[in-house]
Amino acid sequence: MRTLLLVTLSVLVLSAIGFALGPYQTDVYRKLLLWVALALSYNFLFGVAGQVAFSHFTFYGIGAYAMPILLFQAGLPLPVAVVVALVVVILVALAVAIPATRLDGFYLALATLALAQLFIVVLNEGGEVTGGTGGLTNYRLPDIAGVALSGPRYTVVIVLVVVFTWFALQRVDRSFFGRACRAVRDNPQAAAAVGIDIARTKVMAYVLTSALAAVAGMVYAFVDNTVNPPIFGLENTFLLLFMVIIGGSGSLPGAVIGAVLLYLLPFVLAPLIGHHHALVFGLVMVAAVLLQPRGLIGVIESLTARWKRR
Amino acid sequence: MTPPATSPDRLRPISAATPSTVSDATRAAPPLLQVRRLTRHFGGLIAVSDLDFDLQRSEILALIGPNGAGKSTTFNMIAGTLAPSAGEILLEGESVGTYPPHRLAALGVMRTFQHNCLFPGMSLRENVLTGMHGALQRPLWKVMLALRAQREAEARAWQYADELLEFVGLADQRDQPVATLSFGQGRLLETARALAGRPKLILFDEPAAGLTPSECERMALILRQIARQGTGVLLIEHDMPFLLPLADQVVVLNFGQCIARGTADEIRADPEVIEAYLGSRHGAADPAKNIPASTGSANVHPPSADSVDNRPAVASTVSGATSGAADA
Ligand SMILES: Nc1ncnc2c1ncn2[C@@H]1O[C@H](COP(=O)(O)OP(=O)(O)O)[C@@H](O)[C@H]1O
Ligand SMILES: [Mg+2]
């Protein structure tokens, strides 16, 4: 009941912001929301399950490309396209996770790096289907039940995806499964002794978070109404990693703080110091990692703890 | 230290079976644990050779022997972390020798570790909750939708975790991180975590090692309570004064072979055991002097309808035995 209230309230507030913004701000706002959704699920994979994987943007990309391909090349109706895309994503995630998680964590990093590179090659070499280096353009979301979901109305769709991602992951994190993921991350031997199937837990965490990334990708497909290869490369994957680390890995609010800060930082810094913002960015990153391994959420928590003690 | 504040009634949910179902089941069912010609090689070394023993429900079996005798190897085979080279392990008649640890845990075999093996990033309560993994497991979509059944199961689990923390005497620290615990408290927390799985068989690797005398007392009480509620207890232990009053059955290993087996009294009197293990370990002229007399063990076995009142007496007996060892 309380959750329902919180869900409704956050959807209303976040959507209201969407209705108040101009076209340029709307674009920034929507992408910010998508970064938050990605950081939330990557935070679970990296921070809670402790899996060092570089495939999160690949699944975002698979989701994004799947929409125009399935809707306009395969001619599927929207609900069917969504289901097919999810099935494909789950199969790809299983194909990566089942062999990789049986080995040492290092192999997951290697396997997911390989997957990320392979995906870019497939996008570039995909001919008609993927549109090659130019990607796919000139499509738009079909009307749903006669309603055109554009402008602020589409922002509401993105808000729903972000809010769903937050609450779903919060639930999972606080359940037996979140504890199992942390147990496997911290002490696999003890985890097995209490009855946790390590391989199964790792595979489930990977598939779940990859599917959530893909859902964000499906929504992204109609933000720019174009998808092209560079967006889904490793550069953004590393930015995502930094968002999670700087915000505080393993913490949902930390992931939000990290995503908001790192996504908006260039917008603030670029007018002030021009191209040097990348340098400042890098220094902030190094300082954050060295000074507070628990990230900004760690800083906030220790400050509030001190304040309470007063 | 105060004895456990909980009454026996409140502890009843700790065992998988209530006392009445235990007595019904034991009539027909095979023994809880049967170990048959169990053998393990490491290259040319025979760590455990042709070991046989049975463990019944409600029974405490101690595995003793000098260092390198094969105790941990035996233990690890039963817990599923080491595959037997030959022989069989039967749990309630089911051959489980090849099962991985998580599967054995799901069947009701829980363990503690010789060196504490806790989850450092979690609170005490969360550590105990991990022990209930099997009972709480369900499809993730149900978790995401937060169905009522899911929320209720989680709430019950929290309550049970708190009861178990109270049982081992750590209730007031349940929200603290594990890092704040002493070694002995960590051992008690591991015990609560193992109990959370409602085990049929529970394995302890040197439960008394590194504990303060008062923690030892509490551990002895806990082990006895666990057994009384129908769970089989298998323990490796070096501390004879701790162990002998507790064990119903003792199996003595030396170089991987079982050299003696019997009740605590029989083992205490066995010249071969004194020669091979007890004598050499304690190095005393009369090793039997280090071992509490059997009158002591009669005192520490309270009747099953034990009330809270006679527990301090139990505790002082154990404490006397422990400090006796320190004097020797
Ligand atoms: N993983 C292993 N590899 C090789 N030898 C081992 C291994 N584990 C135990 N051993 C050997 O097996 C014998 C029994 O060891 P162990 O079961 O640990 O004895 P205990 O627990 O009774 O002290 C010892 O000789 C030990 O060196
Ligand atoms: Mg050992």
Image (cartoon, coloured by chain):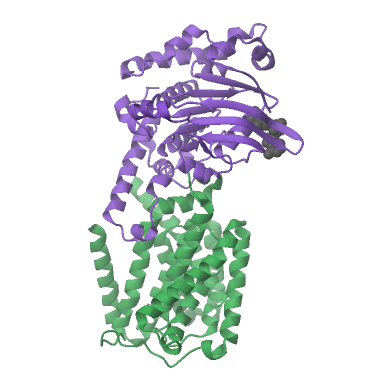
Colour applied to chain B: purple
In this rendering, the count of numbered labels is 0
> Which residue is outermost to the front?
B28
Whether A192 is drawn above or below A58: the answer is above
- B206 up-or-down from B150: above or below: above
In the figure, residue A87 lies in which quadrant?
Answer: bottom left
Is residue B327 among what the camera can see?
no
Give left or right: position of B100 versus A39.
Answer: right
Name the one closer to the observer, A150 or B90: B90
Residue A142 appears left or right of B67: left
> Residue A223 or B235: which is nearer the viewer?
B235
User: Ligand 1: which quarter?
Assistant: top right
Residue A49 placement (x, y as % from top left): 49, 57
Rendered residue at 39%/61% (across/down): A169
The image position of residue A246, as x and y in percent, is 49, 63
Expressed as whole percent of the image width and height from the top left, the position of residue A70 reads 44, 84
From the viewer's side, name the closer residue of B200 and A194: B200
One can see residue B4 in this view:
yes
**Residue B78 vertical placement versus A217 (above, below):** above
* Chain that the image shows in green: A
Measured from the top left, where is residue B164 in percent x and y?
Answer: 37, 34
Q: Please, is residue A96 above or below residue A228 in the view?
A: above
